[in-house]
Amino acid sequence: MSRKPIIAANWKMNMTPSETSAFLEPFLSTFSEPTSVDIVIAPPFISLPKAAETVTDNPAVALSAQNMSHEASGAFTGEVSAAMLKEVPVEYVILGHSERRSLYGEDDAVINKKVKATLEAGFKPILCIGESLEERDGGQLEAVLTTQLEGSLADITAEQMADVVIAYEPVWAIGTGRTATPEQAQETQAFVRSVLTKLFGDDVAGATRIQYGGSVKPGNAGELIGQPDIDGFLVGGASLDPSSFADIVKAGAAG
Ligand code: 13P
């Protein structure tokens, strides 16, 4: 089954509104026509309106938020709702990133509420999962990923899965310069797909895009995208430079 690769820039807590414009102007001139991959940029909330202004009418690039509240409105200081993101607008929302899980205590139950809220609002969640080095070395890899998938995707229907992207990000590869080898990433992502088969059946599992994330760079993107179960990337550090992110997109498009 052919799946359109999706290459996303997760800027994390980087890029002010003016830095966002300075990035997007050269980047968008490289990608002004639709390409064979979906390109997604996820700036911090404060920079999203500037990104939306700059991206307008560019058919190649979509925007993503890095998080969203599952609550509709009210007394939730510091949170951002679906209605607010609709006015930007964004198409995707990253959920369950390992930094949200480890630094802000988000668990699968909360992430599941957020996945439901994003789908109900018409957004496409990019659901992040991944194991720590301790879990991998301790033989817990499959149990951890299964628990994260079952918990985060509880009560999601096969139809709704058409809008869900999974990002497999081994925690030990995030920001460390230590990428999973193409074989490790492939083996793990094939396992993730097998869990999706159990939960939703072959058709859904075959159609779901599974990104790899963790120290993706222009130099390793080509080899990674060549793996059959890697359908794109969620890129942190290397997405902060327009030419390096453009090279990763090009590697994804060539793969
Ligand atoms: P790095 O590409 O900086 O390792 O970050 C990966 C990541 O966490 C993307 O969400």
Image (tube, helix red, strand yellow):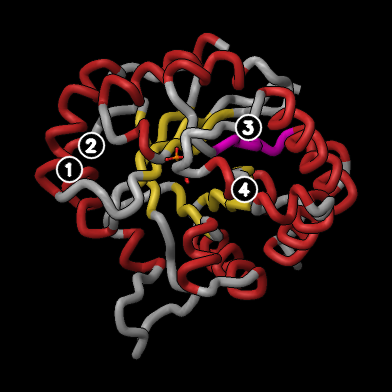
- Amino acid type at circle 2 is Thr
Residue placed under numbered mark 4 in the picture: 164
Q: CA distance from mark 4 to mark 2?
A: 24 Å
Q: Which residue is mark 3?
A: 180
Q: Is residue 137 magenta?
A: no
Closer to viewer: mark 4 or mark 2: 4
Residue 219 versus residue 111: which sits nearer the camera?
219
Q: CA distance from mark 3 to mark 1?
A: 36 Å
Q: Tag 3: residue type?
A: Ala
Q: Mark 4 or 1 closer to N-term?
A: 1
Question: Residue 100's x, y, as percent?
Answer: 48, 64
Q: CA distance from mark 4 to mark 1?
A: 26 Å
100 over 10 or under it: above or below: below
Q: Is residue 181 left or right of residue 199?
A: left
- Quadrant (top left/top right/bottom left/bottom right) for the N terminus: top right
Q: Nearer the viewer, residue 122 or 194?
A: 194
Magenta residues span 207-213
- Whether residue 204 appears in this view of the structure is no
Residue 183, picture quadrant: top right
Give the residue drawn at x 73%, y 34%: 207
For the stretch drawn in magenta, the main secondary structure is strand
Name the residue located 49 percent from the left edge and 22 percent from the top edge.
37
Numbered mark located on residue 56 in the image? 2
Amino acid carrying mark 4 in the image: Val
Return the mark for residue 53. 1
User: Answer yes or no: do the residues labelled 2 and 3 have beta carbons within 8 Å?
Assistant: no
Helix, strand or loop at label 2? It is loop
Q: Position of residue 73 (x, y in %)?
A: 37, 82
4 or 3: tag closer to the N-terminus: 4
